[in-house]
Amino acid sequence: MSGPGRPRPVGSLGEVADALINAWPTDDGEEYVAAVKTALRLFRAISSLR
């Protein structure tokens, strides 16, 4: 189950981006910043493989 304050399962980096942009309860705080940094590292890693 997902919702505010609950984990949201994601299956792709596109879903990660959507969750960060549209579903994250607030766009500040340590958890949000950590999630954005992790997503950026993943995007960069995948981009470097192409």
Image (cartoon, rainbow, N blue to C red):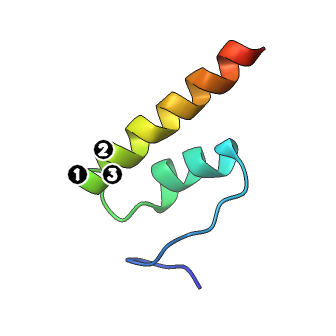
What percent of the width, then of the height, locates residue 24? 42, 60
Q: Viewed as shown, does residue 10 lie left or right of 7?
A: right
Residue at image point 74% right, 17% down? 49
Q: Which mark is residue 30?
A: 1
> What residue sits right under mark 2 in the picture?
33
Q: Examine the rendered structure and indicate whether residue 11 appears above or below residue 38.
A: below
Question: Which class describes the residues within 10 Å of circle 2: few (<14), some (14-19), or many (20+)?
Answer: few
What percent of the width, then of the height, locates residue 10? 65, 60
Question: Which class describes the residues within 10 Å of circle 3: few (<14), some (14-19), or many (20+)?
Answer: some
Q: Viewed as shown, does residue 43 lie left or right of 20?
A: right
Q: Amino acid at mark 1?
A: Glu
Q: Amino acid at mark 2?
A: Val
Q: CA distance from mark 2 to mark 3?
A: 4 Å
Give yes or no for contact between labels 1 and 2 (Cβ–Cβ under 8 Å). Answer: yes
| SS assignment at label 1 | helix
Q: Examine the rendered structure and indicate whether residue 7 appears above or below residue 40.
A: below
The N terminus sits in image quarter: bottom right
Residue at image point 48% right, 48% down? 21
**Res. 38 image quadrant:** top left
Give yes or no for contact between labels 1 and 3 (Cβ–Cβ under 8 Å). Answer: yes
> What residue sits right under mark 3 in the picture?
32
Q: CA distance from mark 1 to mark 3?
A: 6 Å
| SS assignment at label 3 | helix
Q: Amino acid at mark 3?
A: Tyr
